[in-house]
């Protein structure tokens, strides 16, 4: 099937039109371009919050495509079978997509590519989700980097292509294939009443992402070194949800950060390092796929973590009712906004895995359910870093103290007051909205008494250190 036939553009975590190499290649090939999103098994198994957030992004992308005279075709089913069916319906000669790097996506994409090539199609994956392909960054001896700082040094001076603008025109077919209706997929069903609470906090789509990037690099990146650790401040880029779904490219973020660096804004390099931390997570997922669901350091396999997801301590942690205000505020922020401040994530993860000695996989899976910025590589990397079982991990003996962390990073308790209602004479609207976002079956009310700590900061640390010593760490 030669030039002039249609190209199916299989969209996944690349829900944008600018700086989209696969889209550019599809247009350059000649012939009509048919954008497609498939609700396949991997998308079907997304947690409640990321699946709902995906639906918002698809709605925005479909609107943008329609404004250009194009369409987003929605289909549900197995990726290979669905693409083959679309090829038969459209006479397409090629299928292009943006490359993925987590093990489940890699396995799916290999199977799809093999099947389509067997059918005689031009089936190609393209860059776009990362700045540096995992097989292009090597140590002096030819292996991959297992520690972040040398990885940063290896890539910080590399050239990153300038982001490409969105095309002015996407060639359309004479006849469009049938599409599912997005509302029929009911992607918000599992969110229930939480969707209405979460919606105002989402910055959905390419325009919103680029606007936020412009504001951040223009007004906030200079103070990023300090402000990023203050959970009550709007001191971060807030682009994690957009990067997770590909509503903005890392290359665009990189160049905006580099411009800020060259303008002498002091926080720019630290922010660029955070972008590269995301790259590092994906490189490790590519080279060592076990990081996404097993201990990266295999000597942690025998550690006696609690693995009971219904343990009362785990339930209290999930509900934001541990009696440790910083932990509880962070969990409640997640239920109301779909996100959690990064400093707070470290505290929450440390408390679960160290004070409560519960497996990081419990926390990882809960975040998969609740975060609108859920990302398979970054989520796994973050949890293993906090637990001590991952690459470049926090030392096992470092147990974050949530009380001293509040004193240091939220000394006026603005973050705590924003998210905790119990015991406050005039609780904030944000604190009260937690009770509207959570499942009704939890039966919680702002009139409840705030709980005593389920495990005190002092006792939890002592138990964790004793457990590490028994294991010979």
Image (cartoon, helix red, strand yellow):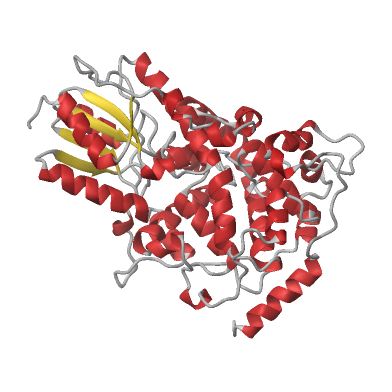
Q: Position of residue 3 (x, y in %)?
A: 9, 28
Q: Is residue 56 left or right of residue 347?
A: left
Query: Quarter of the image holding residue 177?
Result: top left
Residue situated furthest left in the rendering: 2
Task: Decide if residue 299 is in sight here.
Answer: yes
Task: Decide if residue 239 is in sight here.
Answer: no
What residue is rendered at 61% in x and 39% in y?
A: 338
Q: Is residue 364 left or right of residue 23?
A: right
Q: Is residue 165 left or right of residue 406?
A: left
Q: Nearer the viewer, residue 46 or 281?
A: 46
In the rendered image of this protein, does residue 93 appear above or below residue 293? above
Q: Nearer the viewer, residue 238 or 269?
A: 238
What residue is rendered at 64% in x and 84% in y?
A: 470
In the rendered image of this protein, does residue 382 appear above or below residue 24? below
What residue is rendered at 83% in x and 39% in y?
A: 446
Q: Position of residue 377 (x, y in %)?
A: 45, 53
Q: Position of residue 85 (x, y in %)?
A: 20, 32
Quadrant where the N terminus is found in the figure: top left
Q: Is residue 293 left or right of residue 217?
A: left
Q: Position of residue 79 (x, y in %)?
A: 28, 40
């Amino acid at each position: 099937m030669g030039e002039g036939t249609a190209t199916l553009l299989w969209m996944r975590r690349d829900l944008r039109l600018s700086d989209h190499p696969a889209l550019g290649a599809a247009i350059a090939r000649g012939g009509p371009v048919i954008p497609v999103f498939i609700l396949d098994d991997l998308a079907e198994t997304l947690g409640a919050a990321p699946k709902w957030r995906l639906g918002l992004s698809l709605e925005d992308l479909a609107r943008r495509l329609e404004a250009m005279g194009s369409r987003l075709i929605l289909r549900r089913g197995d990726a290979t079978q669905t693409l083959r069916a679309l090829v038969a319906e459209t006479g397409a000669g090629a299928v292009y997509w943006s490359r993925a790097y987590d093990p489940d996506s890699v396995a799916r994409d290999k199977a799809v590519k093999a099947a389509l090539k067997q059918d005689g199609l031009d089936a190609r994956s393209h860059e776009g989700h990362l700045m540096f392909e995992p097989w292009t960054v090597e140590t002096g001896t030819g292996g991959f980097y297992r520690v972040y700082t040398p990885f940063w040094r290896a890539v910080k001076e590399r050239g990153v292509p300038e982001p490409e603008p969105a095309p002015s025109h996407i060639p359309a077919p004479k006849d469009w294939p049938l599409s599912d209706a997005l509302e029929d997929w009911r992607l918000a069903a599992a969110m229930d009443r939480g969707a209405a609470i979460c919606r105002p906090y989402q910055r959905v789509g390419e325009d919103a992402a680029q606007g936020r990037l412009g504001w951040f690099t223009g007004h906030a990146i200079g103070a990023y070194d300090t402000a990023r650790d203050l959970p009550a401040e709007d001191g971060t880029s807030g682009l994690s949800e957009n990067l997770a779904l590909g509503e903005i490219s890392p290359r665009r973020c990189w160049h905006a950060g580099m411009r800020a660096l060259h303008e002498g804004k002091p926080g720019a390099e630290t922010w660029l390092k955070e972008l590269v931390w995301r790259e590092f997570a994906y490189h490790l997922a590519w080279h060592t796929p076990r990081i996404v669901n097993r201990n990266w350091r295999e000597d942690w396999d025998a550690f006696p973590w609690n693995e009971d997801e219904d343990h009362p301590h785990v339930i209290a942690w999930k509900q934001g009712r541990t009696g440790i205000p910083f932990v509880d505020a962070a969990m409640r922020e997640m239920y109301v906004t779909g996100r959690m401040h990064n400093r707070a994530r470290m505290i929450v993860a440390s408390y679960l895995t160290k004070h409560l000695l519960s497996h990081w996989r419990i926390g990882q899976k809960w975040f998969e359910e609740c975060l609108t910025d859920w990302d398979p590589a970054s989520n796994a990397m973050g949890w293993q870093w906090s637990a001590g079982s991952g690459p470049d991990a926090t030392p096992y003996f470092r147990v974050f103290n949530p009380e001293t962390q509040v004193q240091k990073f939220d000394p006026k308790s603005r973050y705590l007051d924003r998210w905790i209602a119990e015991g406050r004479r005039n609780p904030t609207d944000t604190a009260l909205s937690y009770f509207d976002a959570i499942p009704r079956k939890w039966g919680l009310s702002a009139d409840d008494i705030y709980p005593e700590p389920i495990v005190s900061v002092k006792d939890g640390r002592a138990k964790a250190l004793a457990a590490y010593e028994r294991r010979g760490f």
